[in-house]
Image: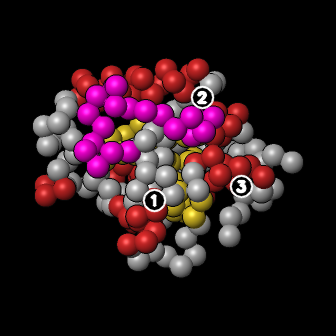
Amino acid sequence: MTKTAENNQLIILDRDGVINLDSDQYIKNPDEWLAIPSSLKAIARLNRAGYKVAVATNQSGISRGFFNTTTLAMMHKKMEMELAQVGAHIDALEYCPDHPDKAGPDRKPRPGMANRLIQLFSARPEETWFVGDSKSDIHCALNANCKPVLVLTGKGKRTRQNTELPEDLPVFDDLDSFVNHLLSETSGTIN
């Protein structure tokens, strides 16, 4: 039996390394934004199950001068179009352009973006999954009182090897594996 979300159930996703391939040199233009096909299909399944799906992404490439907000909007338009091809959509997207040396309240691991998304959908943080591939994603989830999930795509394998993480942190190969597990659970509980 497939689980169906209750009203206002929210899943927050990091972008780079969760929805699309990541790069240590930054994703600087739409040509470099390459979707993980199974992630697009996983988002479609979340949409069909009634979940609100939002993205919270640090984009310090803007403050570093690698790209501008217009280019970022073009990357997000490409993401939107590729999602639409598989019947998927993102309900809301937050990004933070701050440089790590001048981080404000929105740059992960700080919870500003996550808190706004939770408020936007009147979601309960303790019932909100936050899926990421980095230490900052996991700590952002914890700082916003969300339920963190680590995926091993992107920087996930490095994060698991080199980072002290909560002992009970759910870890999945990719977003698709997490969604398979979530939707197969009648209670929605992941151990």
Assess whether residue 71 is covered by the magenta stretch: no
Front position among marks 2 and 1: 1
Determine the CA span between mark 3 and mark 1: 18 Å
Tell me if label 3 and label 1 are in contact, CB under 8 Å: no
Q: Quadrant of the C terminus?
A: bottom right
Question: In the rendered view, would you say 126 is above or below 38?
Answer: below
User: Mark 2 highlights which residue?
Assistant: 88
Res 156 label: 1
Front position among marks 3 and 1: 1
Q: Tell me the chief SS of the magenta region.
A: loop
Residue 105 x, y percent position in the rendering = 25, 55
Residue 169 x, y percent position in the rendering = 55, 70
Residue 30 relative to residue 173: left or right: left
For badge 2, the amino acid type reads: Ala
Q: Earlier in the sequence, mark 3 or mark 1?
A: 1
Q: Say if residue 43 shows up in the picture.
A: no
Instruction: Name the residue at 60% across, 59% down.
Output: 172
Residue 49 relative to residue 153: left or right: right
Assess whether residue 28 is covered by the magenta stretch: yes
For label 1, the SS is helix
Assess disc 1: are there few (<14), some (14-19) or many (≥20) residues with their C-alpha within 10 Å of its C-alpha.
many
Q: Say if residue 21 shows up in the picture.
A: yes
Display coloring: secondary structure
User: Mark 3 highlights which residue?
Assistant: 181
Q: Is 174 or 89 nearer to us in this picture?
A: 174
For label 2, the SS is loop
